[in-house]
């Protein structure tokens, strides 16, 4: 059973919001004593995914949570937007593909950095992505 | 203006030590400031120290790689120094490669790479 220890809901409407969300993620990871590698991993994934909300999803929200399974702490980050959705999810997750001619490594890279990665997307409705990073055992 | 990111000159090498979090606006003006400084000083080398960064996402990585490419077009070689282990691990895991840039463990090694003879 995973319990939520604390929860922070943040807007992702402009570039400064991306900085705020990233900073908060880093602060929570350090507070919950994730090691520097895990902290860099979740902070980077949060940075990529919140930028995607802004650039591809026309803005949305980020929900950052401190979570616990009774023995370890982790950070969970959920991103939601009501943007265009992702029509070819397989291609977007494979990496190296971008509709904005940027790197195309944000989605695939984030997935590799975290312990858990869930995505729900509907064309024309929006996208929800949830990631978790836990203290190493 | 990048304001709080000073660009120092050591011989024919420019040294930029980034100790602040790079927002989009700061990153872009830093790129411009560095290129102007290369032109003004006729620098042949550029060292960008990122030991102050505990995360580098693909956006910042691209800013750094682009800066190196632009510097190259102006005749200056770039060395990025001080990348922390967790940053290197994160970039590799994401599948990011920066083939156009050289790297050094620290400032001393970066300057040595660019041909500066260091006092013992
Ligand atoms: N929140 C989102 N809403 C709609 N499309 C998205 C979203 N996130 C990612 N995508 C799509 O997936 C592609 C890959 O994303 P990513 O790997 O982050 O690369 P990049 O952001 O450089 O394009 C994007 O180009 C975009 O088409
Ligand atoms: Mg992206």
Image (spheres, grey):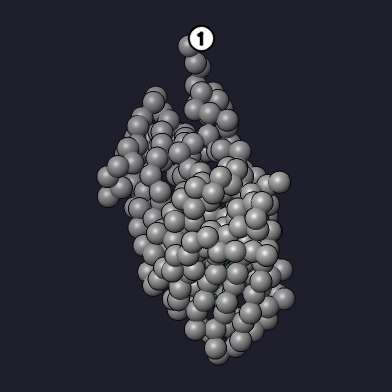
Most foreground residue, B24 or B101? B24
- Classify mark 1: residues with Cα within 10 Å, few (<14), some (14-19) or many (20+): few
Residue at 54% from the left image edge and 88% from the top image edge: A125
Q: Which element is circle 1 on?
A: loop
Most foreground residue, A108 or A115? A115
Left or right? Give the position of B20 relative to A135. left
Residue at 60% from the left image edge and 53% from the top image edge: A73
Residue B68 visible (yes or no): no
Left or right? Give the position of A82 relative to B39. right
* Residue A103 at x, y percent in the picture: 58, 63
**Subunit that carries the residue with mark 1:** B
- B41 versus B66 height, above or below: above
Label count reads 1
Left or right? Give the position of A136 relative to A33. right
- A65 versus A39 height, above or below: below
* Residue A37 at x, y percent in the picture: 61, 45
Q: Which residue is mark 1?
A: B120
């Amino acid at each position: 059973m995973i319990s939520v220890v604390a929860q922070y809901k943040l807007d992702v409407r402009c570039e400064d919001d991306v900085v705020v969300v990233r900073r908060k993620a880093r602060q929570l990871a350090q507070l919950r004593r994730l090691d520097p590698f895990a902290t860099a991993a979740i902070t980077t994934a949060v940075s990529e995914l919140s930028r995607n909300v802004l650039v591809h999803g026309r803005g949305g929200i980020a929900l950052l949570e401190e979570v616990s399974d009774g023995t370890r702490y982790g950070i969970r980050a959920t991103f939601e937007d009501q943007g265009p959705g992702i029509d070819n999810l397989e291609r977007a997750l494979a990496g190296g593909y971008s509709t904005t001619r940027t790197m195309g490594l944000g989605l695939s890279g984030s997935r590799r950095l975290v312990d858990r990665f869930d995505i729900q997307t509907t064309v024309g409705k929006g996208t929800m992505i949830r990631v978790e990073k836990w203290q190493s055992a | 203006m990048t304001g709080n990111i000073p660009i120092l000159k050591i011989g024919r090498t420019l040294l930029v030590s980034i100790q602040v979090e790079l927002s989009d606006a700061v990153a872009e003006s830093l790129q411009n400031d560095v290129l102007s400084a290369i032109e003004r000083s006729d620098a042949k080398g550029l060292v960008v120290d990122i030991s102050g960064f505990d995360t580098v996402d693909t956006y910042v990585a691209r800013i750094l790689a682009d800066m190196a490419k632009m510097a190259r077009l102006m005749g200056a070689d770039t060395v990025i120094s001080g990348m922390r282990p967790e940053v290197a691990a994160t970039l590799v895991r994401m599948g990011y490669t920066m083939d156009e840039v050289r790297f050094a463990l620290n400032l001393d090694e970066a300057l040595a790479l660019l041909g500066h003879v260091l006092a013992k």
